[in-house]
Amino acid sequence: MFSLSRISLLLSVCLLAACSGNGSSTTRKTEPVKYVNGYVGSSGVQSAVIQAVSIDVQGQTATEVIDTDDGQQEVYVGAKATSTTAAYYQVKLDSDDIGRAVTLIVSGKSDDATVERCELVNGCYGGWSYRATKAVPQEYELRSSVGNAQNNMRININWVTHLASALAYTSYIDNSGDGSNPDVPRAGVYTAFTIERANLWLNELFGLSDIVSLRPLAPSELYKDSGLASAIKQESIIYGAIVAAGQQLALEAGQDQVDWLADVVDEFLHNQGQLYQRSSVSSTTSLYRIFSAARTVLQENRTYISAQNYSVPSELTAAIAVLDQRLGALESKTDELTAVDIPASQVKNWLDRINNARAFMADLNERLVNYKGQDPNTCNNGEAQDDNSCVHSFIDPAYVTKTVDYYDALNSIYEGVAPQLATGTRTLKDLVLELIACTNSGCAGDARYDGTNKKLTVDGLVLTMVPVELGVEIEKEGKYNAFDIQLLGEIIVDADDPAVPNVPGGTSGPLDTIASIKFKEVKGTNDAGEEVKSYSRVRIVYSGEEGFSTPPDPVVTPPLGYDLEWPDVEIPATVNGVNQEFNLYFSAKLIGVDDVLVPASPLHYNLTSVALSLVANSDTKGTITEGGKEVELKDLAQVTLSATSSNAANYYSDSVWPELDDFFRVRSGFESGIIESNLFEYRIMEDQSVLFSKIDDKEVFRQADYIDVNITGYGINRLEVFGDTDGVPGLRKCSVIINDANEQETSVCTQLSESEEELTIQKLVDDDLLGLFSIPSRGAYRPLFPDVDNNGSYELITGTDVVLDGKLEAVFTQGINNLSLRAAHELTEGQGSDVERAPLAIVDVKLTRSSKDVWELAVAAGYDYDYLVDVLPTGVRAQSLYLSYLVGNNSAPDENDADVIRDFTFELGGLIIYRGGVKLFTSEEKGESIGVTLASRVDYELNGSGQPCGVINRKDEIVTGNCNAVGYLTYRNSIVGVIREERDGIYVVRFSDGQFLVLGG
C-alpha cells in the first residue's frame, strides 16, 4: 500500500522546490507587463513575426487602417515579437486582453529573414535538405487562438492550432434543407466559446492533451536536452512529429506548406471538423496518413541520431510505439470519418477555469493532506463531496484498512516460512558446491551422483552441470570458461529440522509451517517451431585463456562472475492452516572486481543487473460470472523489479558480496584528495622513430617526442608529439605493452589529433593536457610532477625513468543506471457466492541515479482505476498521481573571471493528479474526470551560504541565494496560477485573478 505522510512536501518541496522567500509586497504605480509565450511550428520556425491580436466586439481579429507609402492599409492591432533561433517567442499582452479571447498570428518578414528548418531526413519539398533552413513563402501565416488569455500563458502556433483557429472562426449553414442540417462552411466569428471548443476538438482529434500549451519537440533536435520532465516528453515528441508530418505530406503532394495547408483547411472545414480515419483516395488527408508520416519522421530521425552516436531518448521509442498502436486501430476504418463531438457543457465548465481550479485545488489539498483517512473526522465513502462537516480523503479509509490487513497477513506468512526458505537457499548453495566437487573427484560410491550425465540427485531436487559454449577456440578442446548448474525439482525443508532457526519473537510456541521451493521446467519454441526446454540455473563464469574441462572449486578459484536465472519458481506455503502460493521469476548478474594495484587481492562482487517478479496468490475466495464465463477470484499481489547498476566493473566494495550501502558510497580509505606514493613512473624520449601506421605489411615510421606514463602494476600510457618535418603535426595517444622479448611496443593508438599550435612534452605537462589516469577499483589519479620554484613550469627529466606520487582526484562509486519497480494488487470483497472485486491499486516507480546528485525519478500511483494510460492509472472513479523529478548539474566559467568555475544545479519537477468521479461542478451521477498538472523548474548555484533551494541540498544549506524557482499550476490544460515558497516552508498558489491558496495542512 502506498502512502504520503506529508503532502505539503509532495506538493511543494518535492515538486516546487522553490526558495523565493518573498514575504512582503510593495505598492506599484505601474502595472507589470504581461506576456504570452510559446513555440512556432515544430519548434523550427525562426525569425518569424508573432502578433497578439485581440478579438473585437464583432468577433473579428482587431484591425486598424494606417497610412503607408503605398496608401492606406488595414493591419492587425497588437504587440509584435520575433521568434528566436529556437523558434521561441514572447509577446506582450495588453492588460485589457487578460481573460479575453486572443489570436496569435505568425507571418514572415518581407526580407526573407523568416526561415523554417527541414525535419525530414531525406529532404523537404523543393530540394530543401535535412536540418537546413529555407525562407518561408510571402503568404505564410499560422494562427493559434485562446478563449481566455492569461499572463505567462503558453500558446504554441503551428498547422494543428491553425486548424483549430479556422474551425473556431467557421459557421455552417444549411442552404438546401429545412435548416436542421447545416453543413456548408462560411466565415463566422471568434468567440471564447467557439475557440475553446475548437481547441478541445483538435485535442480529441489528434489524441493530445492540449494543442495550445503542449510544446512540440522538433524531431531533428531530439538528441538535445529539452528541459522537459519525462512525464511530458513522450507526448511532446508525438506532437512535434505530427507537426513535422506536414512537411512530409506537402512533399508527397508536390506543394509548399502554404498551399498544402490551405487544401487541408478546406477539406477539414468541408467535413465539418472531421478527417477521414483512413482513405482509399491517396490525395485525401486522413488521420492514418498523418500518423504514418509522423511515425516515418520519428523512425528516420532516430536512425540518424543513433548513427551520429548521439543519445536516443527512451521516450522516442515509446512515442513510435504509440503511433504504431494508433495506426493499428485505424487499419479497418477506410473511408470512415472521425466522430469528434465536444458538448457545450464541457466548454462552459472549461471557461470558468480559475474559480473551478481554486475550488478543485482546495478540495484536492484537503484530500492529499488526509491521504489515507488518518484524520479521526474522515468522511465515509459515498458522502457528498461538498460536505464540509468532515474531512475528505484521497483513498477510502475502509480500503486502506483492508489493504493494511492483507499485507499484514502476507507478512505473517512470510515470517512463518522465512527460516525454512533461508535454510533452503543455504542447502542449495551447498548442493551446488557438492556437484562441482563431484565433477572433479568423481564421488565414487555415491549413488546420488551420475558421473556420466554430471547429475546430482538429492531427495526431490536434480542438479545438472552443463558447460556453456561461448564460441571461443578452446571449446574445440573440451575446455570452457562458463558452466551452468541447472535446477529441476523441489527442496522441502522440515520445520522441525534443527538447522531451521526459531521464528524471531516466537514465544508462544512453534508455528505450524509447511514450505518448499519448486524449480520448474519451462517449455517454449525456437524460431524453427521446435520445442525447447529451459531450466533454472546458476551460471559460473571463470577467467583464463586456457579454460577448464570441469568447473574448479569457486572457493579456491574465485569466478569472474555469476549469472543466476530462475524463470519459474513456485513456493507454496502454509502457516497455521492459511495457504498462500508465491510464484517467482528471478535473475541476477554479478561481476568480480579486484584491486588492480594490490597483488592477489580477493575478488569482491557487484550486481550489474537484477530482475524479480513475485506473485502472491491466496486460495479461491469465490466465483463470479464475467462475459458469460465463470471466473475464480483470489487475493493477488505482484511486485516486479528490474535494475541495472553503473560503474559496477570499476568499484571495489568493502564487502565480498553486494550490499545496499555499496551504492553512492566511496570506498573506505580512498576519499578524494589522498596521495598514493610512487604510483606513477614516467620516461620522456625525444626525436624517436615510432611506428605511425601499418597497412597490410607496409609499416610507416615518423619522428616523435613522447612521454610514457607507467601506472605501477597496471599499465603504460604513451602520448606522442609529432612535428611538421615529416608530416602533419599533432598529438596521439597509445597504450603500451611488453612483448615476448620483454620490449615495449605500442598496442592501440588513437587517430592523430592535428594541431596548429607547436606542442612539446613540457607544454603538455605544464598545461595539464595529460589529464587524469583512470584506475579500476580506485578512481582517477593525477601525476604530481615537481615544481620546486613554484613558477607553473614543472621540472622534467628526459631519457630515464622517474617515479612520481599520484593524487586521487575522482573516486569510483556505484550508481543506478535504471531501476523500475511496480507493485500492484487485486483484492476481493466477501466470500463464496457474495464475493466481488475490490478496487485495484498500483504503484510504479522508475529511477535513474548515476551519481549522488544526478538523478531522475518518476512515480505513478493509482487507486480504484480501470486501465493505464501509459503509466497513469485512469478511469471513471480513479484517483491517481504521477510525480517526476529530474536533477542535474553543470559548470560554467565566471563572466568576469574565466579562471573561476561556477557550479550550478537544475531541478525539473512535474506532478499530474487525476481524479475521476468528481461532482464539484456537475450533477451527473458518474461525476467527471479532472486532471491538474504542476510543473516546476529550479536553478541555483552551489557552494554559497544562502537560503536552501530545491530538494537536493535542503539539509546542506549551501547555495549562494541566487535561486530561480517557480511552479506552474495547469488546470484543464491551461496555466491558471503560480506556486512559490513565500515564507520558509509556506507554499502558496497565486491564481491569475488574484485569488490564492496555501498548500499543506
Image (cartoon, rainbow, N blue to C red):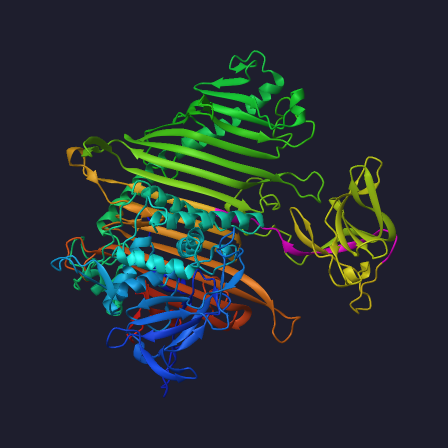
How far from the left and from the top, in percent, is residue 151?
A: 35, 73
How far from the left and from the top, in percent, is residue 415?
A: 37, 37
Q: How many marks?
A: 0
How far from the left and from the top, in percent, is residue 242?
A: 40, 54
Say whether residue 2 is left or right of residue 604.
left
- Specify the farthest residue to the left: 178
- Residue under the image location 51 percent in, 63 percent down: 134
Closer to the camera in the image, 979 or 428: 979
In this picture, is 62 found above or below 925? below
Residue 642's image quarter?
A: top left
Quarter of the C terminus within the rendering: bottom left
Residue 827's image quarter?
A: top left
* Res 360 seen here: no
Closer to the camera in the image, 63 or 686: 63
How far from the left and from the top, in percent, is residue 315?
A: 44, 50
Say whether residue 405 is left or right of residue 893.
left
In this picture, is 352 found above or below 781? below
Residue 335's image quarter?
A: top left
Q: Main secondary structure of the magenta part?
A: strand
Closer to the camera in the image, 30 or 3: 30
For the record, the magenta segment spans 797-818
- Residue under the image location 18 percent in, 35 percent down: 831
Say whether residue 906 is left or right of residue 752.
left
Q: Is residue 807 magenta?
A: yes
Q: Is residue 587 magenta?
A: no
